[in-house]
Image (spheres, helix red, strand yellow):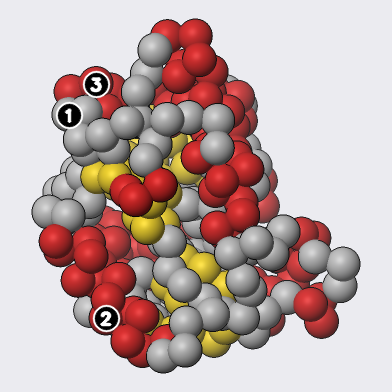
């Protein structure tokens, strides 16, 4: 595990975008794992700029997203389908057939989870996985208590996670109670992982993930065992290291 501490959120975003671009340029048909939430938006904006100004092409890239809310259709403004198309996919040249996001309104959610796992395997696995981290140490929607051998599945969201995400909704009551998420074992199979964190609110989770004991109560602590994992964090997120 390598920890890169930079000055602020803007530098976190730039460094992450440079790593993604480096991966695409060295392997144009790379399989990329993407995250949602507020933290990756700066990275995605920089990737869009690179596409428009520097000719960075996503035309051969395949993508897999970490998660999706159960019960939100792809056109719902708070679905992660909608988020990804608004914040990255629409402005770049990625092929729609190469985009994979769990279907939170599938008739058979368990079958959807199996299908998603199979799709990752058929793509040859994920070359680079971007992650954020929740204040309770979750990665994807793997909440505290998630087994390290977990695969893509439906999970119940903790009240902490729902409250943290309520800012994107009109009220807490509108925040879904369940989601589909890649499991920790699924995430750990990515060839390279980059976790982004910014701000004092993430400092405790970052510290426990990096320095604390490996425990299912801090899902991100599983990353200590990954052979190629980079944390890109700002000074505030690194304040407890």
Q: Residues within 10 Å of mark 3 (few under 14, many from 20)?
A: some
Q: Is residue 165 visible?
A: yes
Instruction: Name the residue carrying label 3.
Output: 25
Q: Is residue 233 above or below residue 107?
A: above
Residue sitting at x 37%, y 58% = 100
Q: Residue furthest right?
A: 170
Q: Earlier in the sequence, mark 2 or mark 3?
A: 3
Tell me how far mark 2 sits from mark 3, CA to CA: 31 Å
Q: Which sits in the foreground, 220 or 88? A: 88
Q: State which quadrant residue 215 falls in.
A: bottom left
Secondary element at tag 2: helix
Secondary element at tag 3: helix
Q: How many numbered discs sit on the rendered protein?
A: 3
Q: State which quadrant residue 3 falls in.
A: top left
Q: Residues within 10 Å of mark 1 (few under 14, many from 20)?
A: few
Residue sitting at x 34%, y 50% = 97
Instruction: Name the residue carrying label 2.
Output: 114
Secondary element at tag 1: loop
Q: Earlier in the sequence, mark 2 or mark 1?
A: 1
Residue sitting at x 41%, y 90% = 108
The dot on residue 27 is 1
Q: Which sits in the foreground, 153 or 39? A: 153
């Amino acid at each position: 595990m390598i920890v890169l501490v930079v000055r602020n959120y803007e530098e976190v975003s730039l460094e992450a975008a440079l790593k993604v671009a480096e991966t695409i340029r060295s392997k144009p048909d790379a399989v990329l794992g993407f995250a949602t939430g507020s933290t990756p938006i700066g990275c995605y904006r920089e990737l869009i700029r690179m596409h428009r100004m520097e000719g960075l092409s996503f035309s051969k890239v395949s993508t897999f997203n970490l998660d999706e809310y159960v019960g939100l259709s792809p056109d719902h403004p708070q679905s992660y389908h909608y988020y990804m198309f608004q914040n990255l996919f629409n402005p770049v040249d990625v092929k729609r057939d190469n985009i994979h996001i769990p279907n939170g309104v599938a008739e058979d959610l368990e079958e959807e989870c199996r299908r998603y796992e199979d799709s990752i395997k058929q793509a040859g696995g994920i070359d680079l996985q971007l992650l954020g981290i929740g204040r309770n140490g979750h990665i994807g929607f793997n909440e505290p208590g998630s087994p390290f051998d977990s695969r893509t599945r439906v999970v119940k969201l903790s009240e902490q996670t729902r409250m943290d995400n309520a800012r994107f909704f009109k009220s807490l009551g509108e925040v879904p109670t369940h989601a589909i998420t890649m499991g920790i074992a699924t995430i750990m199979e990515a060839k390279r992982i980059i976790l982004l964190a910014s701000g004092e609110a993430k400092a405790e989770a970052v510290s426990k993930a990096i320095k604390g004991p490996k425990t299912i109560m801090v899902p991100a602590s599983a990353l200590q065992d990954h052979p190629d994992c980079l944390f890109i964090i700002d000074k505030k997120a690194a304040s407890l290291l």
